[in-house]
Amino acid sequence: MSELVKYSTRDGVAIITVDNPPVNALSTGVPAGILAALKTAEADATVQAVVLAAAGKTFIAGADINDFLNVVAGKAELPVLHPLLHALEDSRKPVVAAIHGMALGGGMEVAMACHYRVAVPDAQVGQPECKLGLIPGAGGTQRLPRLIGPLKAAELCAMGDPIPAPEAVQLGAVDQIIQGNLVDGAVAFAKSIANRPAHKTRELTAKLAGNHSAGFAALREQVRKAKRNLNAPQVAIDAVELSTTLSFAKGIEKEAELFKQCLRATEAQALIHAFFGDRTVAKIPDVPKDTQAFPVRNIAIIGAGTMGGGIAMAFANVGIPVRIKDTQEALDRCLANARRNYENSVKRGRYTKEVMEQRMSLITPQTSYDGFDHVDMIIEAAYESMPLKRQIYSELDKIARVDCVLATNTSTLDINEIAVATGRPQMVIGLHFFSPANAMRLVEIVRGSATSKEVIATAMAVAKALKKVGVLVRNGFGFVGNRMMFPYMYEAQFVVEEGATPEEVDRALAHFGMAMGIFSVDDLGGLDVAARIREEQHQFDKPGLRKPLASDKLVALGRLGQKAGKGWYLYDENRKQTPDLEVVALIRKTAAEAHIPQRTFTEAEIIERTLYGLINEGARILEDGTALRAVDIDVIYLNGYGFPAYRGGPMFYADTVGLKKIYDKICEFREQHGARWEPAPLLKRLAEQGKTFASFDAEKAAHA
């Protein structure tokens, strides 16, 4: 019997306990251990029933994703759970799955092969495989419809979201809620059904009856809109529908075929890359895992604008008290926005009014620095002006405790220049939140040249406490995300000056999978913001470097984006976007005055002109060490810039296209458009060597 699976008996009930921390994944040894324990129970004449439970915080949370990566890499065969699942179903003694925490993916498939399922009230069950570009591969698409009906099963498999145990009882996926101790309740339940005939899930057919074709068609359309450009959710629906037309055995065979197809597709590889990326970015070579972080029990924020207010909500949402300083007018607006945001969540049923009031009570508005000498962290979220930020930090130097972490939310400014305004540059770090800060998952954590390892560890821990993904980057203009954004944004503007429209560019990017087109992004952030950065950073002072023209004219006309009701697009009072022919006319007039030749663009050309510029800058960032790894860049763009997860991030996407192809196209663009398209040296080297950005990551890791 495996050491990952424990066996005991109580009152004529065998208790099989999976103990494979942290999430009891079905990794090597676990299925065999369960099977061996089941055989022991069947051979014991004193055992009347069996309970399958799990130690720790959760039931079996699914398969070990590393096993799937090994299959794709040709290092292993696909794990097969079916012998265990059939053994559970064919057991002569009833088997009860006792669920706490999560029963997901393979864990849910194991539970469904048991004769009964009981769960604590706050447990959740589901088949989330489509979120990794996969479908259930161990009978999930065939057993679940037999328990809850094919349409609901198809919905759960395609959407991938778990459901709470009480809902699972109503649907038929769980038999009973256990109040109090789960194992005690499961043992009592097992004793109560020990003498009943145990049904096998695979033999249930009642809920499969009827004509479900119209329901499946409607669901496919719903999923097509909700899971834009994704293939796995549609395949999951196909697999579930087979349960209504094929025998269980044939359905299992077909499910396995479809699973293998999905596993080898780029979609799954990209989503699995993203899944592991969130974990990889937490590993910082020169900051050991055991580095002592400063405790952050309370914080203060300077600046109650959009970012400051969102950051305050992010901390309040996890129970950390916040002081926020600004003018009274700004504070009143900030608190009103926070309350409105929370009220909308209450209306949607996300939580109660009591929770809302508790969170609001954690935010203390003030117009002075009162109490700033007692907080563990101060986050400056003031206007993006270096003189202003230096002034604030010189003031904080006289107020803050010596062990207080000083963080700036700057999106482009030099962390080192801010830090030298204090006598403690080792305590200064960048915490670049993304708007809305209470919702967006990314925090770009910027280390200055003097930032201590303890402060870095603290920042990473704070991001985790906020349920966000913290990615450490080095100091430099725009850091990683915004530095890559500028060539992407400006190239899009050049494309419209050459004949495309903002709507055509944004449509191409939407079809590619971006959450928002770049002109919509510019309108959201404010055209004046980009204009100010262009001016302050002298981005186009270099002789012969082409400068975008139309955007400055829009700013001069007061077309600053959504906040002005007009920018590249028009916006109504609800900020609904519509194209504006006046903008197109202005662009055409500007291009004519500058003698810019006009042409039409295909979507493929738009994607190459915009995203290849972004990738080229990413290669420079990777080589100069601003980003630790290519996957760090991917995680930043997936979580902060709306890059489609099913493409894995810009650097992973580049690897799938082929770096030689991208390099050749960039060389072509250099011939057509000049020096701004000079290929990054790293891109050139990897392309010539037939390597990938992933291989560069691996090479760096090997020498770390």
Image (cartoon, rainbow, N blue to C red):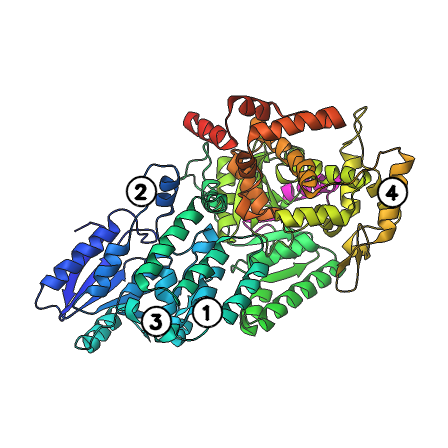
In the image shown, does 567 or 477 lie closer to the viewer? 567
Q: Residues within 10 Å of mark 4 (few under 14, many from 20)?
A: many
The residue wearing badge 3 is 174
Whole-angstrom CA distance, mark 1 to mark 4, is 51 Å
Q: Marks 1 and 4: which is nearer the front? A: 1
The amino acid sitting under disc 3 is: Val
The amino acid sitting under disc 4 is: Arg
Is residue 197 found left or right of 342 in the rendered image? Answer: left
Relative to 133, residue 608 above or below? above
Whole-angstrom CA distance, mark 1 to mark 3, is 17 Å
Among the two numbered marks 2 and 3 on one chain, the one whose residue lies closer to the N terminus: 2
The residue wearing badge 4 is 588
Region in magenta: 373-398
Q: Residue 77 carries which label?
A: 2
In the rendering, at what x and y percent does residue 166 appear?
A: 40, 74
- Assign a secondary structure to mark 1: helix
Q: Is residue 595 visible?
A: yes
